[in-house]
Image: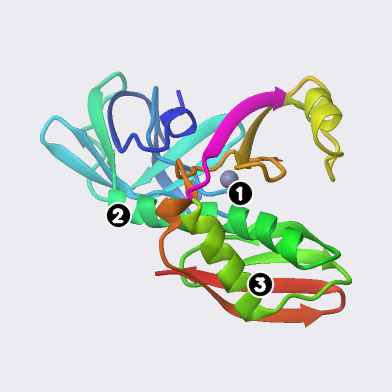
Amino acid sequence: MQLFAENSYIFEAATKVISIAVDEKGTYLVLDRTVFYPQGGGQPSDVGTIKCRDIVLDLTSVRKDGEIIKHYIGGKYTEILTGEDCLCALDGVARTLHMRYHSAGHLLSNVAESICNGIVATKAHCFPNEAYVEFTGTGTCERDAATDAMKMAIEANLPIAIFETNCEDFEKRFYKLPYPMPPKEILRTVQIGNYKPIPCGGTHLASTIEIGNFEVTKIKNKNGNLRISFAVV
Ligand SMILES: [Zn+2]
């Protein structure tokens, strides 16, 4: 069970070890329920600890492999047993920062599309200190105008809603997705205020006010590709 997908504010939960295995990245646990977000969708992996009895394992990274979430651990692991009850606890400071960056990336996509004519967001990378959103199109965007519009949208305390739909329903209600999807496949979708929604499996804040201080740090336009870099501080 992926608790982070149901509620991104759950930072700690009881769990059970389903399996322990090794691959080329190291030793990993598979858990029956997890609070840890696996790296993907432009958002970094969570870090934290998995405590089993008096053994505390450092979680170094989390990766998704098909439907399996692999929790890579450092330190001792040989004493951990399959079926054992454990407690997973993520680093809440790091996760909160990731959620602020990730949610800011969504909002920046929406805001820049609305104030800078003729651009459409295509990609976001929301790792702290290296975050950007890329747009395609012929339009340009001015740094101070983008920052000011973002600050207004943040202060407007817009709700960040999550809902489920499918490709067929999504395209009927909103817009044609830029990638092919099976029509009935469930899409977890995020929508900020009345801006256009987008399918996303990441962890989001509940409202834009939680993004806090925001700044556009750089705008680069190259070969019809506009990159807006940003920071939350
Ligand atoms: Zn997202």
* Disc 2 packing (10 Å; few <14; some 14–19; many ≥20): few
- Closer to the camera, 155 or 121? 155
Label 3 crowding class (10 Å Cα cut-off): few <14, some 14-19, many 20+?
many
Which amino acid does the dot numbered 2 rest on? Answer: Val
Density class for disc 1 (Cα within 10 Å; few <14, some 14-19, many ≥20) is some
For label 1, being within 8 Å of ligand 1 is answered yes
Find numbered disc 2 in the image and state the secondary structure of the residue it sits on.
helix
Which span of residues is magenta-colored? 157-165
Q: Secondary structure at mark 1?
A: loop
Q: Residue at x 52, y 49 (%)?
A: 39
Secondary element at image label 3: strand
Residue position marked by numbered label 2 in the rendering: 93
**Residue at image location 62% in from the left, 60% down from the top:** 108
Location of residue 53 in the rendering, given as x and y in whole percent from the top left corner: 13, 30
| Residue 186 appears in the rendering | no
Residue that appears at 83% across and 24% down: 168
The residue depicted at 39 percent of the width and 57 percent of the height is 97
Numbered mark located on residue 228 in the image: 3
Where residue 162 appears, as percent x and y from the top left, is: 57, 32
Give the residue at mark 1: 41
Residue 97 in view, yes or no: yes
Q: Quadrant of residue 122?
A: bottom right
